[in-house]
Image: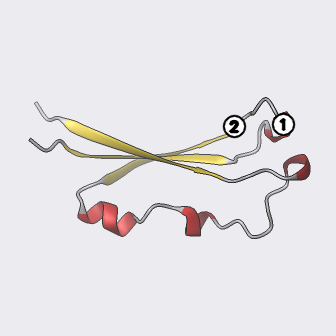
Amino acid sequence: MTKWEYFSFRQTRSIVAKGMIPPKFDWEKEKPDLKALGEQGWELVAVVPSSGVYPVNANNAGFTNEMTWIFKRLARS
């Protein structure tokens, strides 16, 4: 039976007044080093966008401000 190990990485961008994206936010700059992860045997299996709602400021409901990257690789013995 094949066994896998998993790794996840969450990107979060901040929300400023009324759900606006900070002007200099760059998803590309914030992503994990995909080449290095690939060299370590990790395979990207999903990127899940989500809208985080925080008790302090619920203005970002429905606004994608988080992405969870999910990777897998064969489990090492």
Give the residue at the far front of this rendering. Answer: 56
Eyeballing the image, is 55 above or below 66?
above
Q: Residues within 10 Å of mark 1 (few under 14, many from 20)?
A: some
Q: Which mark is residue 25?
A: none
Q: Residue at x 24, y 60 (%)?
A: 40
Choose between 71 and 9: the one closer to the eye. Answer: 9
The residue to which callout 2 is attached is 52
Q: Residues within 10 Å of mark 2 (few under 14, many from 20)?
A: some
Residue 59 x %, y %: 86, 39
Residue reaching furthest right? Answer: 18
x and y percentages locating residue 6 in the rendered image: 32, 41
Q: Name the residue: 85% across, 55% down.
A: 20
Q: In this rendering, which labeled residue sits more in front, label 2 or label 1? A: 1
The kind of residue tagged 1 is Asn
How many marks are shown on the rendered structure? 2
Find residue 31 and report its horizontal and vertical position in percent.
51, 62
Secondary structure of residue under mark 2: loop
Q: Quadrant of residue 8?
A: top left
Q: Which amino acid is tagged 2? A: Gly
Of 49 and 53, which appears nearest the observer? 53
- Specify how the rendered protein is coloured: secondary structure
- Asked whether the beta carbons under mark 2 and mark 1 sit within 8 Å of each other, the answer is no
Which mark is first along the chain, 1 or 2?
2
- The residue wearing badge 1 is 57
Where residue 55 sits, quadrant-wise, is: top right
**On the rendered image, what quadrant is the N terminus found in?**
top left
Gap in angstroms between the C-alphas marked 2 and 1: 10 Å
Q: Residue at x 36, y 44 (%)?
A: 7
Would residue 49 be found to the left or right of residue 46 on screen?
A: right
The answer to whether 20 appears left or right of 9 in the picture is right
